[in-house]
Amino acid sequence: MRAILSAVLLAAAVAGPVAAHAETPPAAAKTKAAYKVQDTDLGTMLDDPAAKAILLKYIPEIVNNPQIEMGRGMTLAQLQQFAGDQLTDEKLAKIQADLDAARPN
């Protein structure tokens, strides 16, 4: 857990400041957009209840980390560089598959 915390702190320092979100989206059963682990920042996914539920399913130790807010501006692929043991390629693929399945038609 300390390694994740250190990695997120380091990643946040490298990524720089993150813009605040103006509003929180309402709860939804499906994600509102096509989220990509390679392109979508963690903060955007955490603000979407459906996407956050997917993240909690696969990486609860990262999502529930008290200092995760510092990594909001990074993508999961970027965070993988610092937490590769918890964000494996296999987990990223599963997260992506669930995100794709949760998209509205």
Image (spheres, grey):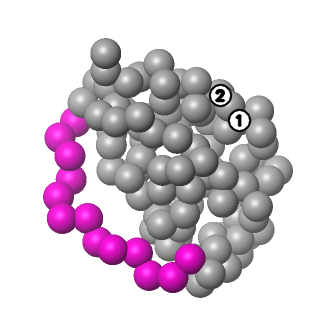
Q: What predominant SS class does the magenta segment belong to? A: loop
Report the residue marked by disc 2.
94
In the rendered image, the vertical position of residue 77 relative to residue 6, given as above or below: above
Q: Which residues are drawn in magenta?
A: 15-27
- The quadrant in which residue 21 appears is bottom left
Q: Residue at the spot x=75%, y=48% of the render?
A: 86
Q: Total marks drawn?
A: 2
Q: Is residue 1 visible?
A: no
In the rendered image, the vertical position of residue 40 relative to residue 105, given as above or below: below
Q: Quadrant of the C terminus?
A: top left
Could you tell me residue 1's position as x and y percent?
72, 62
Q: Is residue 8 left or right of residue 50?
A: right
- The quadrant in which residue 30 appears is top left
Front one among 66 and 9? 9
Whether pointer 2 and pointer 1 mark residues with C-beta atoms closer than 8 Å, the reply is yes
Callout 1, which amino acid? Answer: Lys
Residue 62 got which mark? none
Q: Is residue 95 left or right of residue 6?
A: left
Could you tell me residue 4's position as x and y percent?
70, 64
Q: Is residue 84 left or right of residue 22?
A: right
Tell me the CA gap for discs 2 and 1: 5 Å
Report the residue marked by disc 1.
91
Q: Is residue 97 visible?
A: yes
In the rendered image, the vertical position of residue 37 relative to residue 96, given as above or below: below
Q: Is residue 17 magenta?
A: yes
Please tell me how crowded label 1 is: few (under 14), some (14-19), or many (20+) other residues with Cα within 10 Å. some
Kindly state the secondary structure of the residue where label 1 is placed.
helix
Could you tell me residue 77's position as x and y percent?
66, 52
